[in-house]
Image (cartoon, coloured by chain):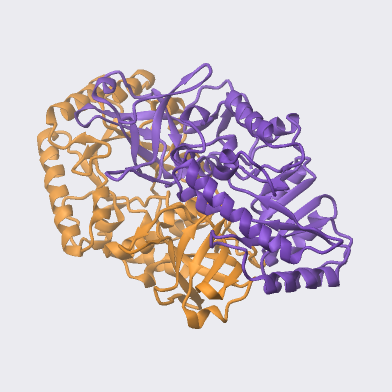
Chain colours: A purple, B orange
Amino acid sequence: MMTMTLDIDPICRPTLLVKESIVRRNIARMLNKVPDSIRFRPHFKTHQSHTIGAIYRKMGVDKITVSSVEMADYFANDGWNDITIAVPLNILQLDRVVALAQSISVGILIDSKSTADHLLEILNGSEQINIWLEIDAGYGRTGFKWDCITEISACLNAIQTRHPMIKVNGLLTHSGHSYQLRSAQDILALHAQTMIRLTAVKNEISRPDWCPLISIGDTPSCSTIKSFEGIDEIRPGNFVYYDLTQEQIGSCTQADIAVAVAAPIIGVYPDRNEVVIYGGAVHFSKEVMDTGSEKVYGYLVTSSSDGWTPLPRSNRLVKLSQEQGTVKVDSERINSLRVGDLIYIQPIHACLAADLLRSHTRVV
Amino acid sequence: MMTMTLDIDPICRPTLLVKESIVRRNIARMLNKVPDSIRFRPHFKTHQSHTIGAIYRKMGVDKITVSSVEMADYFANDGWNDITIAVPLNILQLDRVVALAQSISVGILIDSKSTADHLLEILNGSEQINIWLEIDAGYGRTGFKWDCITEISACLNAIQTRHPMIKVNGLLTHSGHSYQLRSAQDILALHAQTMIRLTAVKNEISRPDWCPLISIGDTPSCSTIKSFEGIDEIRPGNFVYYDLTQEQIGSCTQADIAVAVAAPIIGVYPDRNEVVIYGGAVHFSKEVMDTGSEKVYGYLVTSSSDGWTPLPRSNRLVKLSQEQGTVKVDSERINSLRVGDLIYIQPIHACLAADLLRSHTRVV
């Protein structure tokens, strides 16, 4: 993982720049819209950063989400003591999860009786483990299918019978299919469908002495919904940085995107209105936006005191080799660019660029 | 970078497995086809590995290529003393390049008078710097355009006049457009065109006392050509591992692919013939193969004593989240798969997967 510093050395290589003012604004906006009665458990896979974590902490956040056991260990070492690992439990890392649950509160996801059996075998009931039953409310990746009540109930019963001391929190879902949508109306409709399905499961499995909580996750839904009815916890992650994908979905405006990759120009080719940068697939990732006519890996911005100022979209990253990128620039701009200049490019998917550049990130 | 070990711990997370026997065979095949008169300077960006480097060294290789100053430093620390950094010189790292050239022989690429001027300013003529003029023979990424002789000559003259002690090796090209081709015939035709263009430049700039060397680079061409006429040096990299892209191009067969990613199954979904693995975009990269009907991120293999055995191509990695992947498997296979099983997936682009998994690689 990484420790980010306010480095005063000049930037000589691809570096993720994070505007702290935008990060704070994005967190504050989400905190403001979430009612106090709802638990805010942001996903830390987006930044994987001690520094960004510290900003969250100062703003009152004390519960987090991660997407691997490795990340859970990293943030536990960083002082976080209530962490949900929001992917189905990897039984090959069960020992490590149980070890972690000796010292902090660990949320885990179960989406099959088979995985539950492996877990129940190893637990003695004293661990600080909180189980979420992951529900597939339509995304089709992981989770019990929302309409397979028999299966969900059987798994729940197995857990509660075998280890009545182990806490089953409730139902957790990630509506990742929201990433395919492009309007607030569609996102709201998807969210309504998700809530109907989760509520149906909840009603079926509730008991007089136990009522499952409901946890939802994705940045498009959490950025768009106005009502949090029926929800007990949200786990958005990407919103802290946002990116061009979220802007395309409609979760944010470009002004909300906190990050850009600074990259040195290593070649200027005026005859084809292109510059080549030190900055390639191993820095941006190959996450691509298909505009219909071409593939784009990022759009250019300039840095200003209060954020990033977009250049016309004709200024764009169009090709990525392993370590180099090819950038189309406007003909009036090309003559002002020189080798050794830094240019700033916002990524298509901030989480992947941040992961790749986690040792080369600066909060500015 | 990484140190790879013959680890006997069980694999619990996404891990790149490298079959050493295939690596040795791939290197031996390339060594055998290259005449002794031609310098073999393999590109180490593919593996970025001390262990694979050591295999090369034992097989007689002592000159290497890298694609960043960081990689040059890594391999210089690992005892390599003749390294070409095969991207246009990043003038923001010029100090570091010159520092390296105090202790080892460093090849650098120049593709503009502007970059050459920055370099000449800092050199005193005593450095072990070997300059290559990068030529764009048609790829259109970096390099002097092959038909801009005036520009090439002017740059060459500037270097040789200012620092007659600094060695100008000659002309270097990377025919990356070979990656778009799908037949040996097309690759040979492209190579012929490249050689005609490089030879034209060579003839124009040669002098009675100096004749430029010619260095070519790409794995498809180096794997396919039979004649090395006119070539002084080759710099292929990917061939040491190969991958599904190279197989599609025709540079290799699937039996030549040395690597696969081992990934634990975390969910089995028989109703849709899918399993979900711990293994996502941050392990495989989002390099994709478009089959026309869908996007594929890798194909499944099983491990055998002498290599990897392909499963039918209907067993494939079709979706990647940050940390998870969705794998389609045949209906007759799904019932034999369990959570906690490892499956093996060959990547679309070995260099990117190897970069992402460089701390989690095993030579087996």
Q: Which residue lies furthest to the top in this view?
A: A305
Q: Which residue lies furthest to the bottom in this view?
A: B332
Identify which residue, A50 or A227, lies in the foreground. A227
Quadrant in which the C terminus of chain B appears: bottom right
Identify which residue, B56 or A292, lies in the foreground. A292
Compared with B19, A356 (above or below) is above
Compared with B301, A185 (above or below) is above
Q: Position of residue A116 (x, y in %)?
A: 73, 69
B271 on left or right of A272: right
User: How many numbered markers are drawn?
Assistant: 0
Compared with A108, A290 (above or below) is above
Q: Where is residue A342 in the image (x, y as percent from the top left)?
A: 42, 25
Q: Position of residue B154 (x, y in %)?
A: 18, 24
* Res. B113 visible in picture: yes
User: Which residue appears at 74% of the width and 74% of the height?
Assistant: A154
* Res. B19 visible in picture: no
A80 on left or right of A2: right
B195 on left or right of A80: left
Q: Where is residue A305 in the image (x, y as percent from the top left)?
A: 52, 16
Identify which residue, A265 or B35, lies in the foreground. A265
